[in-house]
Amino acid sequence: MESAFVIFGGTGDLSRRELYPALFNMHRRDKLNARVIACARSDMTHEEFVAKATEFLHKWKATPKMATFLEKLEYLKVDPESQESFLALRKKIGSPEAVVCDLAVPEAAFAKIIRGLEKAFPRQFRMEKLRLLVEKPFGHDLKSARRLNRLMQRVVGEQNIYRIDHFLAKEVVENLLIVRFANELFRAVWNRRHIECVQISFSEQLGMEGRGEFYEKTGALRDFVQSHIMQVLGLLAMEEPDCLEDKVIKDGKAAVLRRLQPLKRSDVVFGQYTSGMMGGKEVPGYTGEPNVSKRSKTETFVAMRAFVNTPRWRGVPFYIRTGKRMGHNSGVISIVFKSSSTCAFGKAMPESNVLQLVVNPEELFLLRFNLKTPQYRSNIKTFNMEYCYSCEHVNERRTPYEKIYDDSLRGVKTRFSRADEVEYAWRWLETLKAKPKLHKYAAGSRGPKAADLLIEKTGRSWVDYSENIRVDFIYGAESGPAGKA
């Protein structure tokens, strides 16, 4: 029996960029045993919608399966304020094996749509067949997240709630537990005795891209840290599970988020970008973006220091950094091991070993280690070993939304967040009782100087990812940037 995908916000930007390409790729692989019903407020004929969807998928327009994919698409005008719209949707859906509803709409519309579904569909249908996919942000604070959780649990039950965090479907993030527990080399030293600090850095060159109104209500802390980075931190710091089953992993992440030490104002740096040069062109500052207040105090950059109060991690700082309009696009998780304490090397003390898991621009695993150079016995230099995951598996990889949609059809919830994880993350952020000072930084830069000072005052520094590592690896360069081989 065929299932049905219902996409609320079916003509929006997220649908254009991510959802229809994912569904089409599933169809190309013969994994899409479902109709696709796009819902939006606009009056549109079926032919007009198919033309729009074809435009969304213009890169694949000439591919053999495009025509059969377009045959799966349907359109229905749905007004969240109109109960007649949801009754029409119920009639259109019929009685499929499962109904996956993706709420690809602003958070303000979540509750209206969920209540509309509640009134239109019988309870038995909702509990047995209706699955809700909810995009972030999941609430805007702890109170709103709890309220949304309770509403969804009442309407479809926790078993049918799929809180989307597409970071959990990225290959490098999915490999975190494998790196930790399937390699004794790392499993044995993944603790406070051997690790100096952990750094999680994600930088974006993009500015608002028309999302100014949304960002004014959200900011970097709520948009990126509360969701993506908290999930990554949970996987990095959780205790070793007995098995890699869904409930066990979620229990482990929740336990980490529950044991985070309350935030101090001195642990957090907020920044906001000003005008600057990006790609040879001048771009406006945040307050010059459309739908942004000229006097806005919203942060577009966050750097922070967190501590997990468990025996494994007590005293080890987790440094977090993320920002918009940065000088480069990158996502890097760096495990910085403690330096050798031996005096055998005299003045030529070796640098710290560093394991880097690079999420973007490519998916890489890098290990920094020390060797001597041919010239002198005690001349120690840092070298890198690299494995390019995205290069090796270029034809096998699925996009995060392909995995998310495939899992939701099959009822697999490992790549989704649980209610308590979301609420613990909000609870921790709300321990920051007062906003820190807002520092300005130029678009195209590394962010505010205060972020460097946050880590430098403890004698540490940010470990950045450089694409020069790849150049050196491929061409066998003997020299390069300091610390690169």
Image (cartoon, helix red, strand yellow):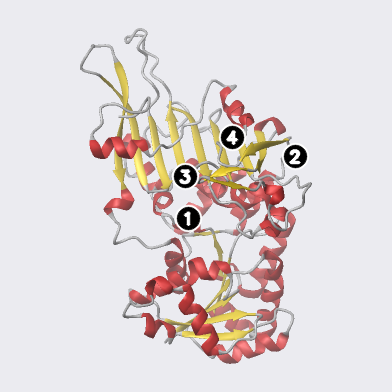
Of all residues, the one furthest to the right in this rendering is 295
Q: Which comes sooner in the sequence, label 2 or label 3?
A: 3
Which residue position holds label 2?
435
Residue 159 appearing in the image:
no
Q: CA distance from mark 1 to mark 3?
A: 17 Å
Density class for disc 3 (Cα within 10 Å; few <14, some 14-19, many ≥20) is many
Residue 296 is left or right of residue 53, and the answer is right
User: For residue 184, which quarter of the picture?
Assistant: top left
> Which amino acid type is marked by label 1?
Leu
Of tags 4 and 3, which is closer to the observer? 3
Task: Look at the picture and state if 291 lies above or below 348.
Answer: below
Regarding mark 3 in the picture, which secondary structure is present there?
strand
Regarding mark 2 in the picture, which secondary structure is present there?
loop
Density class for disc 4 (Cα within 10 Å; few <14, some 14-19, many ≥20) is some
Q: Position of residue 294 (x, y in %)?
A: 77, 49
Q: Position of residue 426 (x, y in %)?
A: 67, 50
In-front residue for pair 33/10: 10
Which residue position holds label 1?
168
Which residue position holds label 4?
309
Res. 330 mark: 3
User: For residue 459, which quarter of the picture?
Assistant: top right
Task: Look at the picture and state if 160 lies above or below 95.
Answer: above
> Which amino acid type is marked by label 2?
Lys
Of tags 1 and 2, which is closer to the observer? 2
Residue 119 is left or right of residue 467, and the answer is right
Of tags 2 and 3, which is closer to the observer? 3
Of tags 1 and 3, which is closer to the observer? 3
Regarding mark 4 in the picture, which secondary structure is present there?
loop
